[in-house]
Image (cartoon, helix red, strand yellow):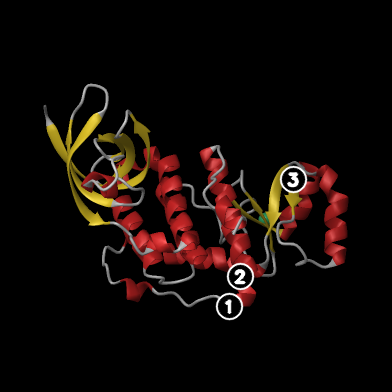
Amino acid sequence: MPTFSLTAINLGGFQIGESDKVISMFSAERGLVRAVAKGAKKPGTKMAGKSEALCANKLLIAKGRSLDIITQAESIETFRKVRTDLKRLTFCLYYAELTAAFGEGLEEESEVYYHVLLNSLRMQEALISDARQLSLEFSMFLLKQLGVSPELTVCVRCRQPLTEYNIAAFYSETGGIGCNRCGQDSRSKSIVSEVSVKGQYSSDFRKKRDEDVEHYEERGTFVTPLVWKMLVNADVASDDLIDPSTDLKARRRPDYSEAQAPALDAAHRLVQRYLEDRAGKKMRTLDLLKQL
Ligand SMILES: [Zn+2]
């Protein structure tokens, strides 16, 4: 049987037969792959530990007729500490969910993506910064790799430079932030807005928005200057993720304050929805955090 080697991170898997598991992985060499881990469902076996989601392994794989089979696995990283922190673990599993959803579009850059994913998981494990902040950066990196970075510096409609005084809403379908002038002009063109950050706007603004709603078509999400800045910062910081150095401390970011947490949450949700629109499906992993 022909064999080949892979360096891969496990994204998830399901049981087949009594003791085997089919694992989906993202590999540096081939992007998304699936292979059978024999005996992975037998407790206490070496393969059981190595086949867990998020584990990174060096693998030797035998080409099978329908499914390839893992014949050797050497552990690179198990992320044991992440597994004791439910919040961090949930964000790491969110990275895996995103990778499974978008992996097919990442084949050409699979080596770069593999290393960024591995380092991003390490950054979560090392508590380098707030889990959500890191996740926002990782999301921005993913969007860049997919070639669908949202427009954050000029109005997505009229190309006027955006500032904290003229930003208005994020338009997921159009792919970026629109200025307030376009938001008003759009009454004739029918564009819609939906408030996601409650209580951030004056009542006049809110009243005006409510009057306009029936004329609108595309659903946008209002963004505050702080949410916008967080998006821009995360976009810039995401460039660093490509740096292959494993000196994680050098990647520490200034933490946002408690008071800024709702804006960070809003920025993260906005980008998650943007990703979901691109994927054409909901991401479910982070729903778990709402139940905590
Ligand atoms: Zn504009």
SS at circle 2: helix
Where does label 3 land, which residue? 191
Mark 2 or mark 3, which is nearer the start of the sequence?
A: 3
Q: Residue furthest top?
A: 65
Q: Quadrant of residue 267?
A: bottom right
Mark 1 or mark 3, which is nearer the start of the sequence?
A: 3
State the mark number for residue 223.
none
Circles 1 and 2: CB distance less than 8 Å? yes
Q: Is residue 160 left or right of residue 90?
A: right
> What's the amino acid at mark 3?
Ile
Residue 258 x %, y %: 60, 76
Where does label 2 land, which residue? 261
Residue 140 appears anywhere in the view: no
SS at circle 1: loop
Q: Which of the pair 268/184 is nearer the observer? A: 268
Q: Which of the pair 22/264 is nearer the observer? A: 22
Q: Is residue 111 left or right of residue 83?
A: left
